[in-house]
C-alpha cells in the first residue's frame, strides 16, 4: 500500500514568521504539499518513524484534503500514532496544549491564521515541536534546505476513513486517534482562571460579546462562555466555523471586526467585547467606548495577572516582540521582574518560557499568552481580562486609564502598506539600512535621533543569533519608529511601520492616538521615503 512518488523541488517553500503560508492555488499544485510534508518529516531529529504527533487545523478551505494527505504520508513514513481533532479541527493553542498534555513529539497545524480563506485565498502549514511551540529557525531552515533537493516522497495508496467519529482506527500500521478538540482545552482554562468569579460577574448584569469571526474558536467559545460560564445564548457571535470565514478576514482588529467595534462604541454598548482569529491564537479586547491596544493589553495583563489563580504568586518575567510597544517594560521595571525583547514570531518565546525566565508574552499583532501552552492564546487572554474584571469590579476603561496614570501611556499604531511589489519594498529596506549610521544625531521633525539599528536577537538560552529583524529608529524623547517587512503575507510584500510615543505618568493620556502620533508619521516618511518607494500616499490598514 505504501508508494514512493518521484517529484522535483519547488523553490518557494521557505517557512515565514509562522510556517509556510501561500495561496490555496499554490498548495493545490501537484506534489506541493507533499514535498513540504516529506521535507518536514525528513528533517526531524531521529526521523519520523515511531513518533507520535498531534494534527488539526482551523477548518479553512483545503483543511480536509491536507489532513488526509498528511495522515497518509505520516503512515507511509512509519509514524506510530497521530492524534487528530474531530473533523480535522484544532485551534492553535488547543493543539499546543495537546502536544504538552499527551507528551507527544510534536504537531502539524494547518492554518493561515488571520489571513482570509477559500479557494482564492490562503492556506498554511506549520510544525510545532515537543514543548508545544512553533518549530525554531534551526528546524525550519532544515526543512527549507531539504525542500530544495527533494526527489521523492512516500504516501499510501488508500483512502483515509472519516474523522467525524471519536475513537481509534488503524491506517497501514499507524494508529489514528480522533479526539474532541474542545474538552482538554476548556478544562485547562478552568484550571487557570476563577470560573466561579467570572460566572458571578456574567450573572450580575455585566454584558459581553465574543465574535468568533466564523473561525475555529466558535465551538470553544460556546463551550466556555455560554456553557461553563453561563453567559446568555447569543453572547458568542459568528460561532459556526466556515471554510471561507463568511468571506471576511478572520483578523481580530478594529478594521476587520468593525461591527463588534461599532457595537462597543455605540450607545447601550455591552461592558466587554472580544474576538479571536482564524486559528484562535489572536485576540481583540474592547470595553464600552474603548479599544485596548494589544501592547497596552499585554502590559495590563502582566500588571494584573496575580488576580487570577494560575498567577497568584506573581509572574517571573515578561517577553514582547521588538515592534511591540514598551508599555510592558514599565511594568517589569516597576515590579523588578525580567523583561525580554525578541524578534517577531511566537517561536522566539519558547526558550524563555521553557527556562522559566518569563510567564507572560505578547505581541503588537494581537497575540498574548503565558507558560500554560507554547502558543499565543486568544481565549486565554480574554478569560484573563474577564478574571481581572471580576476581581477589580471596575470597567475596562477605568482599568486602562488607571494603568496609564500609574505607568504612563505608550501611544502606539502600526501602519501597513500591503501588496507592495517585493522589489520596491526590498529597495526601501536596503536604502534604510545603508543610511542607518548617518541617522544618529540628526533632528527629524524636531526630534533628535538617539540611535538607529537593525535589530539582532541573541537568544540568552541557546545562544542562537537572528539578524535583520527590523530597523529601529530611537529618539531622545523616548519615541520610536520601527520598519520591517511582514513574514506572513502571501502576495507581494507588506511593509509595516510601527509608531510609538511615550507620555509619562502625569502627562496627557487622553489624546486621540493618530493625533498623538502625527509628527512620527511625518518622520517615518522623511526617514524611509515610503511614498517614493511604494507609490502609496497612505497605508492600506492602520491598527
Ligand atoms: C504570526 C506570528 C506572530 C507574528 C505575526 C505577524 O501570527 O506567530 O508572532 O507577530 O504572525 O507577523 P508578521 O509581522 O511577520 O506578518 P499569526 O497569528 O499570523 O500566526
Image: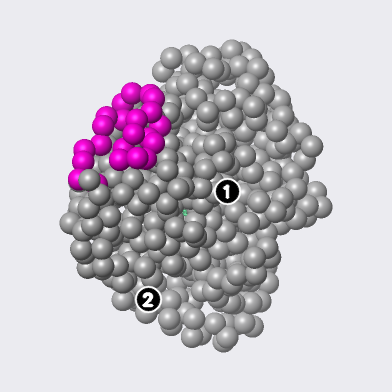
Q: Tell me: 59 left or right of 299.
A: left
> Residue at (71%, 57%) from the top-left corner?
339
Q: Earlier in the sequence, mark 1 or mark 2?
A: 1
Coordinates of residue 443 in the picture (x, y in percent): 60, 79
Q: Is residue 343 magenta?
A: no
Query: Could you say which disc has been placed on residue 426 in the image?
Result: 2
> Residue at (28%, 70%) from the top-left corner?
11
How is the rendered protein coloured? one colour
Q: Nearer the viewer, residue 374 or 275?
A: 374
Q: Quadrant of the N terminus?
A: top left
- Mark 1 to mark 2: distance in Å? 35 Å
Coordinates of residue 272 in the picture (x, y in percent): 54, 28
Q: Tell me: 340 left or right of 133.
A: right
Q: Quadrant of residue 257?
A: top left
Q: Nearer the viewer, residue 351 or 306?
A: 351
Coordinates of residue 69 in the picture (x, y in percent): 27, 46
Q: Are marks 1 and 2 in contact (CB under 8 Å)?
A: no
Q: For the residue carrying disc 2, how many other residues have a C-alpha within 10 Å: few (<14), some (14-19), or many (20+)?
A: some
> Residue at (26%, 63%) from the top-left corner?
152
Q: What residue is pinned by disc 1?
A: 131
Q: Is residue 162 magenta?
A: yes
Query: Could you say which disc has been placed on residue 437 in the image?
Result: none
Q: Nearer the viewer, residue 399 or 372?
A: 372
Query: What range of the chain is rendered magenta?
Result: 156-177
Q: Residue furthest left?
A: 30
Q: Tell me: 259 left or right of 411.
A: left
Coordinates of residue 33 in the picture (x, y in percent): 27, 55
Amino acid at each position: 500500500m505504501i508508494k514512493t512518488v518521484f517529484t522535483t523541488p519547488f523553490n518557494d517553500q521557505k517557512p515565514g514568521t509562522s510556517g509556510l503560508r501561500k495561496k490555496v492555488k499554490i498548495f493545490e499544485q501537484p506534489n506541493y504539499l507533499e514535498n513540504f510534508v516529506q521535507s518536514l518529516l525528513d528533517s526531524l531529529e531521529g526521523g519520523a518513524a515511531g513518533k507520535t504527533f498531534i494534527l488539526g487545523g482551523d477548518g479553512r478551505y483545503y483543511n480536509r484534503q491536507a489532513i488526509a494527505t498528511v495522515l497518509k504520508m505520516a503512515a507511509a513514513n512509519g509514524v506510530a500514532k497521530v492524534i487528530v481533532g474531530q473533523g480535522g479541527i484544532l485551534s492553535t493553542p488547543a493543539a499546543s496544549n495537546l502536544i504538552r498534555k499527551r507528551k507527544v513529539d510534536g504537531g502539524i497545524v494547518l492554518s493561515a491564521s488571520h489571513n482570509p480563506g477559500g479557494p482564492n485565498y490562503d492556506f498554511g502549514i506549520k510544525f510545532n515541536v515537543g514543548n508545544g511551540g512553533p518549530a525554531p529557525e534551526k528546524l525550519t531552515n532544515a526543512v527549507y534546505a531539504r525542500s530544495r533537493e527533494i526527489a521523492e516522497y512516500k504516501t499510501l495508496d488508500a483512502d483515509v476513513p472519516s474523522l467525524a467519529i471519536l475513537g481509534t482506527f488503524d491506517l497501514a500500521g499507524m494508529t489514528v486517534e480522533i479526539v474532541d478538540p474542545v474538552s482538554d482545552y476548556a478544562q485547562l482554562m478552568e484550571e487557570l482562571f476563577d470560573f466561579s468569579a467570572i460566572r458571578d460577574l456574567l450573572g450580575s448584569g455585566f454584558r459581553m460579546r465574543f465574535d468568533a469571526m466564523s473561525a475555529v474558536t466558535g465551538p470553544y467559545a460556546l463551550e466556555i462562555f455560554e456553557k461553563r460560564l453561563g453567559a446568555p445564548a447569543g453572547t458568542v457571535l459568528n460561532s459556526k466555523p466556515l471554510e471561507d470565514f463568511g468571506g471576511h478576514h478572520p483578523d481580530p482588529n478594529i478594521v476587520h471586526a468593525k461591527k463588534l467595534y461599532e457595537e462597543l462604541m455605540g450607545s447601550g454598548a455591552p461592558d466587554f467585547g472580544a474576538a479571536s482569529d482564524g486559528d484562535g491564537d489572536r485576540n481583540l479586547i474592547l470595553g464600552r467606548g474603548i479599544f485596548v491596544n494589544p501592547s497596552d493589553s499585554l502590559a495590563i495583563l502582566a500588571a494584573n495577572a496575580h488576580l487570577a489563580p494560575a498567577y497568584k504568586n506573581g509572574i517571573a518575567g515578561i517577553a514582547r516582540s521588538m515592534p511591540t510597544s514598551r508599555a510592558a517594560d514599565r511594568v517589569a521595571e516597576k515590579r523588578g521582574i525580567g523583561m525580554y525583547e525578541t524578534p517577531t514570531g511566537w517561536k522566539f518565546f519558547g526558550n524563555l518560557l521553557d527556562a522559566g525566565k518569563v510567564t507572560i508574552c505578547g505581541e503588537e499583532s494581537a497575540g498574548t499568552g503565558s507558560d500554560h501552552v507554547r502558543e499565543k492564546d486568544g481565549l486565554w487572554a480574554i478569560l484573563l481580562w474577564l478574571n481581572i474584571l471580576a476581581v477589580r469590579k471596575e470597567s475596562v476603561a477605568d482599568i486602562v486609564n488607571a494603568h496609564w496614570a500609574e505607568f504612563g501611556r505608550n501611544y502606539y499604531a502600526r501602519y501597513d502598506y500591503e501588496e507592495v511589489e517585493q522589489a520596491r519594498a526590498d529597495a526601501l529596506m536596503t536604502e534604510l539600512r545603508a543610511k542607518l549610521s548617518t541617522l544618529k544625531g540628526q533632528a527629524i521633525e524636531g526630534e533628535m535621533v538617539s540611535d538607529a539599528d537593525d535589530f539582532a536577537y541573541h537568544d540568552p538560552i541557546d545562544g542562537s543569533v537572528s539578524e535583520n529583524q527590523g530597523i529601529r529608529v530611537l529618539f531622545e524623547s523616548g519615541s520610536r519608529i520601527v520598519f520591517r517587512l511582514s513574514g506572513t503575507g502571501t502576495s507581494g510584500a507588506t511593509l509595516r511601520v510601527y509608531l510609538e510615543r511615550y507620555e509619562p505618568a502625569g502627562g496627557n493620556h487622553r489624546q486621540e492616538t493618530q493625533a498623538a502620533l502625527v509628527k512620527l508619521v511625518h518622520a517615518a516618511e522623511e526617514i524611509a521615503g515610503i511614498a517614493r518607494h511604494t507609490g502609496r500616499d497612505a497605508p492600506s490598514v492602520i491598527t
